[in-house]
Image: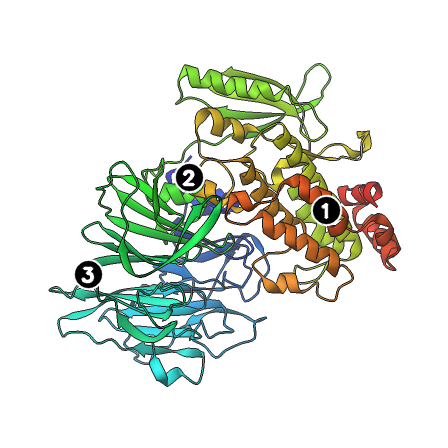
Amino acid sequence: MSNIMTSLSGYSNCDKIAQHLIETIKLFYVFDDCRGPNLLFVTNDDKVYALGSNQYGSLGLGHKQQIVEPVCVPELSGQQIQQFVNGSTFAMAITGNHQVFGWGLNSLGQLARNRTEPTVYLKPDKVIFPEDSASIVQLSCGQSHVLALTTDGNVYAWGSNNRGQLGCGLSMKVTTISDKPIKVSFRLDNDLNINLIYCTQMSSFAITGGVGDGKGRVYSWGDNNYHQLGHRHESSLARPKLIKKLKHVHCVCYSWSAGVTYFLTKRGKLYYCGGGSKEVNGSLSVVSVIHPKLIKSNLAGSSLKFSTMYHLQSYQRQESFINLVTDNKIYCLINGTDISETDFNNIRDYYRQRCRMTFETYKYVHNYDNGAFGQVFKVRQKSDNRPFAIKTILLEDFSDETKQKALQEAQGLANVKSKYVVDYRNSWIEDNQLYIQMEYCSTTLADLLQMRSNIFNRSSDQTMDSLEFYMSCELFKEVLECVHYIQHENIIHRDLKPENFLFADIHQQLSAQYLRLGDFGIAIEANSLQIAAGTPKYMAPEISRGLKATLKSDIYSVGCIGQDLFDICLTDSNRIGKYKDHQLCSYFLELNKHLSQMVVQVPKKRPELKTVLEMHEKWSPDNVFVKNDDNFSNRLDTIEQLDSGGLCYDLFLFSA
C-alpha cells in the first residue's frame, strides 16, 4: 500500500476513491452533517473533489443529493485551497491568496451573501469584505455564524446573530442576521491585537496576542445561558467582553454536548466554565460554573501539564470531542470535567479511529501509520461447491497467550446456534492470522437500504407510504430480536450496523425470521486483543470516549440503525415533522419516542430491547392496515415490475 493510501485508510468515504486519484491527493478534509460523512480533497493539479452525504449542499455542488464517487468542484479548483472549515449546514475555505469561499445553505446569511430559502443550496463563491485588502488567515464556524481573522488582527463576523454572537452591539438590535461581514470592535491596548478566534454553537471567543501581560487574554460574546462565556449576569452579550480572571490562554474549546467552555493556558493548566455535567447514580447533574475554574486532574499524575487541546464536532452524532495532549499521550474530557487517558499517542490516529473524521485540513504526511483491519472473503467448499464466508484477523503483533484467547473466543461462537445469528462453523490460526468460517449470506440490510429508494421512487424529503413503513417496522422488529437474543446470552457485539445484519435465503427459511446478525469478529478483537473497534456513525458516545462497552452500548447502535431504516434523523425536525397529519402519524410518534430513548447520552437511561419489542403493536401497523390502503395493490405491482424475483419483492410476499 502506498504512503498516501495508508494516510487515508480508515477515514470515511476514502475507500470510494480510485487508486489513480488517491495517488495525486495533496490535501484532504473529512467532516459530517446530520445525515453522514463528507470528504473534500485537493489533488496535485489543484483540482478539488467532493463526495459524501451532502445533506445541506456542503460539498459545493449546488444540490443536496448524496455523492458516492468523487465529483470535481470547478468553482474551487485552481484556487490553491489551503484550509477547509464547516458549520452545521455549510462549509468555507481559505485560498492561497487569503481569500474566502463559502457554499451550502445560506438561509441565515452564513455564506455572507443575500439570504436564500432553506431549500436553496449555493455553489462556492468568494466572500466580499468591506476592505478589499482584507487578508484572511483564520476562519471559525459556529452553527450558523462565522468569524474571520485578518493578517493585521482585525475580526469580521457574519451570519446568525440571534444571541449576539456577531459582537456588533446595538447596531444590529433590529435584526438577528447579517449577510455581510461586519467588523468586530475590541478595546485593546496599543501593543495588543487579536491572534486567535473561536466559534461555538451560538457564542464567540477571541484571544489576544502581542507583548506583555495582556497577551493571552480572552474576550467572549454571544449566548451565555449556561455561563459558558465566563460572565455572571447576562444571558447573552452583544459585544466582546474581557474575561478578567483569565491570563496566558492559548487555546479555547467548547463542548456542545456538555455546555462547557475550556481554556488551556501556556503553563499547561486547564480551566472551565459553564454547565459542567457529571454522572451521579446514572443521571447527569448540571453544575453551572460562572467564572473559569481550574480543573484538577483525577488521574494518578495530577500534576500533568497539557501542551495543547483539540476539538472535533460531529453534527451527525450531536457530540463534541475535546482532547488534551501531553508527553505524546492523548487524553479526553468526559462528563464535563473528568480527564481520561486513552490508548493513543497521536491525535490524528485518535480522530481517525474514533470518529473517522479529521479535526483540521490535513496535508499529505509521509509514513503515517495505518493499523490492522480484518477482511472477509467468499470461499467454496471443494467437496460440494457450497459457499462460505471467511473472516481473517491479523495476530502478528500479539503474544501466544493472547492469540489462544482470541481463538477460544472465536471457537465459542460455534456454540451459538439460533435463527437470530449467522451460523459459525470453524475457527483456526494459520500464518499469524485468525480464520473464522461462517455461513455465507450474499445480501445485507445495508444493501436493502441502498436499493429501496429506486424501488419506491421516494426521496428522503418525502414520507413513506404504508407498505414501505410496514416493511421497515418488520425489519426493525427483527433487528431488535437479533440483538435481544445475543444480549440474553450476555454477548456485546460492539459493531452493530446495517452491514452486519444479513439476509438468509428466504425461500429456505422454515420460520418467518429472515434477518440474521453476523460478524462477531469485532467482539473478539475488543475482548481478546484489546483493539478499539466499531463504526463511528453507530458507536455509542461512551465508546467514542474510550470507556468500556456494555449491553447498553449496543442499544445505542440499534437506535441509530432504526433511524436509517425509517429514513429519519432525530436531530432534524424537518425529517420528523413530515409525518404530521399523516395516516401513519400515531405509529411514527410512538416509534420516534423509542428511538429517542435508545440514543440518549446516559447509558442507564436507554430502554431494554424487550420493552421496545413489547410495544411493537403501538409503533407498527399490522398487515390488515396495510392491505386496506387504497394504493396497496398498485404499489405491490410496481415493486414486482421493478424488483421481480429480487429481495424487496420477496420480503413483501413474506411480510405483507
In the rendered image, the residue lying farthest to the front is 281
Image x and y of residue 456, in percent: 75, 55
Three-letter amino acid code at disc 2? Gly
Q: Residue at x 60, y 63 (%)?
A: 573
What distance separates the C-alpha of mark 1 from that of mark 2? 33 Å
Find disc 1 in the rendering and name its residue. Answer: 615
Lateral position of residue 554 relative to residue 142, left or right: right
Image x and y of residue 237, in percent: 35, 74
Find disc 3 in the rendering and name its residue. Answer: 247
Say which quadrant the N terminus sits in: top left
Three-letter amino acid code at disc 1? Met
Circle 3: element type: loop
Q: Residues within 10 Å of mark 1 (few under 14, many from 20)?
A: few
Q: Looking at the rendered structure, which numbered label has been put on residue 546?
A: 2
What distance separates the C-alpha of mark 2 from that of mark 3? 32 Å
Q: Looking at the rendered structure, which numbered label has been put on residue 276?
A: none
Q: Is residue 41 visible?
A: no
**1 and 2 marks in contact (CB < 8 Å):** no
